[in-house]
Image (cartoon, rainbow, N blue to C red):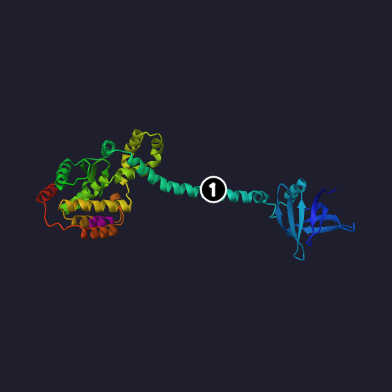
Amino acid sequence: MSTTYTGTYHEAGGRYYQATIFLSAVTITIRYRDEAGQEKDVYWLTKELIAFNDQVAGSELRYRNKKGEIERLVIRDPQLVQALKNTLTHHRLFGKAHTRLFGNIWLKLGVIALIIIAILVGLYAWLMPWLGDRMASRFSKIQEIDMGEQMYQAVMQQYKVDTHKTEVLNAFYEQLHYDIGYPVKITVVESNDMNAFAIPGGHIVVYDAILEQMKTPEELAALLGHEGSHIALRHSLRNIFRDLSQKMFISLLLGNESGIASTVVNNASALQQLQYSRSLETEADDNGLQLMAKNNISTQGMVRLMKMLQKESSGAEPAPFLSTHPVFKDRISNIEKQIQQLPAVSTSNDNLKKLFHEIYE
């Protein structure tokens, strides 16, 4: 004897009847009595079922008859619901019943998760630069110089210093009379890479390979003016704090400034690959031009420096210093515009020429 179930059968015309349900894999038989008390059977082919809505309060099964009309079976018998799922596992409506039951929930949760991720990404993109600048602003100049000295000692362990060029280049810098508000110390190191970088607090490291490409003292003055501007404007400090802001976040929350300094010093090697934004590079170019013009040094040296770097960067394997700098074409264009607004320099500095040539002796 087959198992029977109960449900409420709704005709296409709107009338409904309490019914007894017989279930097989091919058909669903709905037996009910009409208004006259006559027993009638309705046969649904399971392949013609069009919808199943499974709810705790009551489920509903829909069927399209031969006339194209929709008939419904309202089910409050949990045993019938389970029997449908067990018997019609081959059917598209029941083979993924769990997906339908939870589909809307998972969809909503997925949308919420995506929104949360988007908010977090946006906060990260905004918060990390702000956090880096915030940490940099909390450092006094004395703290910056002290930390920069520790960074310098850490990073110099991997280099061999050219003492002759270092001595001459520091004398050259003194003749420039650049006043950037920090005690600048320049170190020339031996390397085949075209590189130079500024350390927070006043140290500038110059690779001897970049010196070999310079033709005039004004180009060297431009390089030192540019790197010195990164120090004066605290670009190096702000950028490395931005790069390490995640690691230093806990130290900031705890107000542990010594912890921040330790994190920076331990990551001093990042200075060699430190990337500045285009706005910071442009700011350093502009400030470097101001330093040159103020001290009667031809600002055309900055143009020649950029053109030399542009030429070097066009090679198959540009050096890290060049690959991390913005497009030189744009920088040269900006520099030439800035020069037009600066007073022309007609004098030359014999001391600079003499010291420049001593570098290569």
Of the pair 33 and 255, the residue shown nearer to us: 255
Q: Residue at x 35, y 40 (%)?
A: 135
Q: Position of residue 241 (x, y in %)?
A: 35, 42
- In screen coordinates, is 262 left or right of 166? right
**Image vertical order of residue 38 relative to residue 161, above or below:** below
Res 249 → quadrant: top left
Secondary structure under tag 1 reads helix
> Is residue 71 covered in magenta?
no
Q: Position of residue 211 (x, y in %)?
A: 19, 49
Q: Position of residue 75 (x, y in %)?
A: 76, 50
Q: Position of residue 139 (x, y in %)?
A: 31, 38
Label the magenta part by its dominant secondary structure. Answer: helix
Q: Residue at x 48, y 48 (%)?
A: 119
- In screen coordinates, is 207 left or right of 269? left
- Res. 314 in view: no
**Image vertical order of residue 344 relative to residue 266, above or below:** below
Res 130 → quadrant: top left
Q: Residue at x 25, y 58 (%)?
A: 332
- Res. 104 in view: yes
Amino acid beneath label 1: Ala
Res 238 → quadrant: top left
Residue extent of the magenta highlight: 306-313
Residue highlighted by disc 1: 113
**Image vertical order of residue 269 relative to residue 91, above or below:** above
Q: Residue at x 40, y 45 (%)?
A: 128
